[in-house]
Amino acid sequence: MDIAAKLDKLDEVPKPIWIALMVLGFMVYWPIGLLVLAYLIWGRRMNCWSHARGRWHNNGKERFSGAGRWHGPTSGNRAFDEYREETLRRLEDEQREFVEFLERLRFAKDRAEFDQFMADRRSRAQQGPEPQPQA
């Protein structure tokens, strides 16, 4: 029986048994547990790497525009991609304008509060010092 056939038989063992073997390996002698863990990860038993590759690489269809913005995968339809880029650019501009509006609104509110404080302070100064309570 060759090595590939033996490895195929190992792949038929269910994941819970592999996890139990890993835990027992760590309890008996830590290098055994480490070897089982390495086999699980690099042997693709846990399917960790295949999901990450699909999520992050997405078959190479992502692109980076010259304007410094990251765009998702292309649809393959250039007209739709241009429309989507234009819509995203317009939404980013509207968001930036809205944030600027909120900043101006906060500044105006702060200015009004400060002006009210200064007016109250001037009116108190013109009235003279308030009598201090006698204790």
Image (tube, helix red, strand yellow):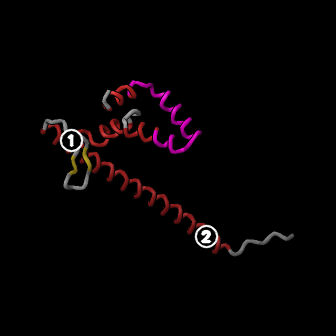
At label 1, counting other C-alpha atoms closer than 10 Å, the crowd grade (few under 14, some 14-19, many 20 or more) is few
**In the image, what residue occupies the spot 37% across and 53% down?**
99
Would you say 46 lies left or right of 16 here? left
For marks 2 and 1, give the CA distance. 64 Å
Of the residues shown, which amino acid type is indicated by label 2? Arg
**In the image, what residue occupies the spot 22% across and 50% down?**
64
Residue 73, position as x, y percentages in the image: 23, 40
Residue 96, position as x, y percentages in the image: 32, 53
Q: Quadrant of the N terminus?
A: top left
Residue 129, position as x, y percentages in the image: 71, 75
The secondary element bearing badge 1 is classed as loop
Q: Who is closer to the viewer here, 124 or 87?
A: 87
Of the residues shown, which amino acid type is indicated by label 1? Lys
Would you say 124 lies left or right of 12 here? right
Would you say 35 lies left or right of 129 here? left
> For residue 13: magenta?
yes
At label 2, counting other C-alpha atoms closer than 10 Å, the crowd grade (few under 14, some 14-19, many 20 or more) is few
Q: Who is closer to the viewer here, 67 or 25?
A: 25
Residue matched to label 2:
121
Query: Which disc number belongs to residue 14?
Result: none
Mark found first going from the N terminus, 2 or 1? 1
User: For residue 67, what is the image quadrant?
Assistant: bottom left
Residue matched to label 1:
61
Instruction: Tell me which segment is drawn in magenta.
Output: 11-35
Determine contact: label 2, label 1, CB under 8 Å: no
Q: Who is closer to the viewer here, 55 or 93?
A: 55
Residue 31, position as x, y percentages in the image: 51, 45
